[in-house]
Image (cartoon, rainbow, N blue to C red):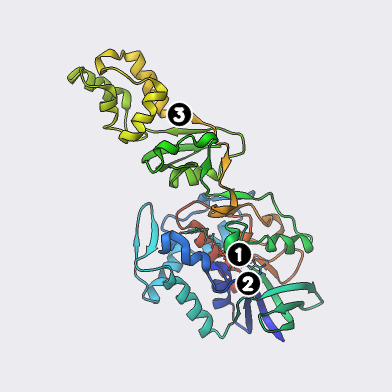
Amino acid sequence: MQFDTVIIGAGAAGMMCAAHVGGRVLIVDHAKAPGEKIRISGGGRCNFTNMYCAPDSFLSQNPHFAKSALARYTQWDFIELVDRHGIPWHEKTLGQLFCDHSAKDIIEMLRGLMQAAGVELRLQSSVSNIEQHDDHFSLTLQTPDRQAQIKARHLVIATGGKSIPKMGATGFAYDIARQFGLPVTDTRPALVPFTFAERRFAEISGVSTPARVTAGGTSFDEALLFTHRGLSGPAVLQASSYWREGDPITVNLIPANDLFDNLRAQRQISGRKNLTTELAQHLPARLVDHLSTQMELSGNLADWSDARLSDLAQALAAWELSPSGTEGYRTAEVTLGGIDTDALSSSTMMAKDIPNLFFIGEAVDVTGWLGGYNFQWAWSSAMACARSI
Ligand code: FDA
């Protein structure tokens, strides 16, 4: 069997590429259904892009690499595609766009586009023995009922990263890159909850509060969630991408107001008010209880001098915590790192030294923030590849 293009991985990037590349196309996935991560994303509603998508919301060893693809297929292009297919959507917060009904709308749209383009989809199938010849790649395709030898002029690797192995994530892309002599950067779980020794926050698990979380010099102002195992919530997931094993993180529990001024003003008005009662105006009561045992927050406001109130406000604004680790690939939304961008063309995603071999999506060392950025990278990198073939 001979194809113009064979795509391995029928996730977000693979399907988007298959739908737009043209010619005779085969897309292969070992899962039972295509786009499984799309299906579970955004709590089942798929945060499919972000209105404020820009290159500075992506991490990579080469921060310039993503610019070209993101500029040539933007969030507005994908929104236009979604609109053309009549999929209703809404902005939740911070420019994050979600389907009104279900993430399945996005999968159905991509499946429909692939069908219209005559793409052959093989599920529960795998590819092995990939070799490059003068003007084509040869590979062995194993489907549930047979084995076949395939020839492909272009080969696109869209098998994603290592996050959530239970859903079929593999290091396949990295293995293929190495087979062809392409460098792969260190990879690690990102957009992932932190864990702490001795289940430090178990007693306040479920408590959520707005916070500014800083790791590796980068801060995010969003919700923080205490969990049985440690810390989660958007601010924490975002910060995890900038965290290095062994480093502390800083949590500002009062990012929105000047606690010191507020406490001083309250002391003036009602000095007999309990300090913890007043703090519970600014923080969840269960969190105040938890902090009060650790920081000895007893007494009335009148008992607290300016100096002590100032120390307290500072402590709550710069709470240094040392995670023991993260929940790892088991729950990480993405993999940081991947195919070294030095080895790829930023305008086509083709390997610079291996003509007609392409890597797209999460497999590449481009990782977005939480909030629709990773899907936008999947769409943009897929289109850069599809348009160049
Ligand atoms: P993706 O992982 O989507 O696809 C890879 C495909 O390759 C899979 O279908 C897999 O089965 C297949 N495959 C792997 N190895 C193979 C092999 N050896 N042989 C054959 N097939 C193989 N992002 C975002 O922007 N908004 C959001 O709302 C969310 N939400 C979210 C929730 C959760 C729980 C997770 C885990 C992740 C997200 N993400 C997200 C991240 C987003 O899902 C991710 O960045 C994209 O799916 C990446 O798209 P790719 O196509 O590159 O990989």
Residue 180 to residue 148: above or below: above
Q: CA distance from mark 1 to mark 2?
A: 8 Å
Residue pointed to by mark 2: 30
- Residue 72 x, y percent position in the rendering: 53, 65
Q: CA distance from mark 3 to mark 2?
A: 45 Å
Q: Is the shortest distance between ligand 1 and the CB of mark 1 under 8 Å?
A: yes
From the Cβ of disc 2, is ligand 1 less than 8 Å away?
A: yes
Residue 168 got which mark?
1
Q: Quarter holding the N terminus? A: bottom right
State the image quarter where residue 297 is shown: top left
Proximity of marks 1 and 2: CB atoms separated by less than 8 Å: yes
Separation (CA) of disc 3 from disc 1? 38 Å
Q: Can the viewer see residue 54?
A: yes
- State the residue in front, 347 or 253: 253
- Quarter of the displayed picture in which ligand 1 can be seen: bottom right
Residue indicated by mark 3: 319
Residue 158 at what x, y percent from top left?
A: 62, 67
Mark seen at residue 150: none
Three-letter code, disc 3: Trp
